[in-house]
Amino acid sequence: MSKRIAGPEIERLIQLLAKVPGLGPRSARRAALHLIKKKEQLLAPLAAAMGEAVEKVRICSRCGNVDTIDPCTLCSDPRRDPATIIVVEDVADLWALERAGAMNVRYHVLGGTLSPLDGVGPDDLNIKGLVARLAEGEVREVILAVNATVEGQTTAHYLTDQLSAFDIKVTRLAHGVPVGGELDYLDEGTLAAALKSRTAF
Amino acid sequence: MSKRIAGPEIERLIQLLAKVPGLGPRSARRAALHLIKKKEQLLAPLAAAMGEAVEKVRICSRCGNVDTIDPCTLCSDPRRDPATIIVVEDVADLWALERAGAMNVRYHVLGGTLSPLDGVGPDDLNIKGLVARLAEGEVREVILAVNATVEGQTTAHYLTDQLSAFDIKVTRLAHGVPVGGELDYLDEGTLAAALKSRTAF
């Protein structure tokens, strides 16, 4: 705002809200006003929840997930199959796969992809942690669930090299038509891949 | 999330973020993850700013604005012309007009519009406070800057009746405001132009 129209506390709240992904300068003002109007029902609980997150949230020293306990809920869940690890770029990918709920296994968060142009090398990713987990000998399969981007695929190739020393099956997610997707809207690469790895009907 | 994949503190944070206007369940997860990753730079300051807002923000007893002081920054600013009051429906409208920065005057926030169908009558709006301010005798002009909706115009007509007892010029925003549009979403240029060419009501 050009002029001071409210106390600095409110303007600071708006400025910080504008940095939250999904909100911009204009929607941050709307959000701030809504929060202020719902002070007791929403603003106060949200402030408390954030304060608690600041205090309690930590990175799992084993898999790189974020949680309030270390090792995280997934790493310390005895009902999960310890013989399979799904390797993901980011915690968001881990959460997405968990929502799919397809496999009851463990994860490993790399924290990014190899990107020489951006100066991201192997030492910047949590690869040593993965190798250490495999060296324990319990893991039989590593599923590389990296994004289907150039960087993701580069990272997958690098990891395959690194893991070749272990007697472990290394797999990657299938390429194909998204469930519910329409062929007409899909790119040629996906369609070619889906044709190539077609399955018996 | 169907399964517990993180501590309850993180899921509570996501649930509360999903209630912020502009964020939904999916973007709330993204926002939570981003906040957690930027714990020191963003999450902690935001938690502090929200906590401070909970403690300090109050409604101005004079005009109905939200601020950390009462009377608010605008009501206690001696450089503002006390002879003109702009009447708005909501604090968001006040902020929008202030961003336009066309007039250095005082405001009055009604807190809504007359809406018999929703059970909102004159006593549910901050009309008594407006009449009391006019009775002090300093105000020469009231600008009705209500939204160009049916409820807004109904409210404007009702207010004009109520204010006819005073020797005060009652004006409204010039046309230029799109019919059916809401002030909070308008660009500053349009708002400034509309203020400048206000007409007798």
Image (cartoon, coloured by chain):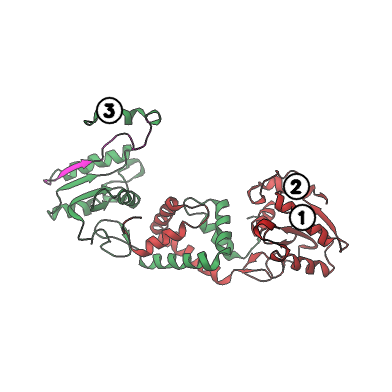
Chain colours: A green, B red
Q: Position of residue A113 (x, y in %)?
A: 31, 45
Q: Chain of mark 2?
A: B
Direction from residue A183 to residue B66 in the image, left or right = right
According to the image, label 2 marks what residue? B194
Q: Give the number of the disc on residue A169.
A: none
Q: Which numbered marker is on residue B156?
A: 1
Which residue corresponds to mark 3?
A195
Chain identity of mark 3: A
The residues tagged by marks 1 and 2 sit, at their Cα atoms, a distance apart of 16 Å
Q: What is the quadrant of the C terminus of chain A in the image?
A: top left
Q: Position of residue B38 (x, y in %)?
A: 41, 58
Secondary structure of the residue carrying tag 3 is: helix
Q: Name the residue rendered at 39%, 28% in the picture.
A: A184
Residue B15 pos. (x, y %): 43, 59
Query: Which region of the structure is painted magenta?
Result: A166-182
Q: Nearer the viewer, residue A36 or A167?
A: A36
Tell me the CA gap for discs 3 and 2. 60 Å
> Residue type at mark 1?
Ala
Does the rendering let one see residue B102? no
For the residues carrying marks 3 and 1, which lies nearer the camera in this image? 1
Q: Earlier in the sequence, mark 1 or mark 2?
A: 1
Examine the rendering and report whether any part of residue A190 can be seen: yes
In three-dimensional space, the C-alpha distance between marks 3 and 1, rounded to whole angstroms, equals: 65 Å
Q: Quadrant of residue B118?
A: bottom right
Element class at badge 1: helix
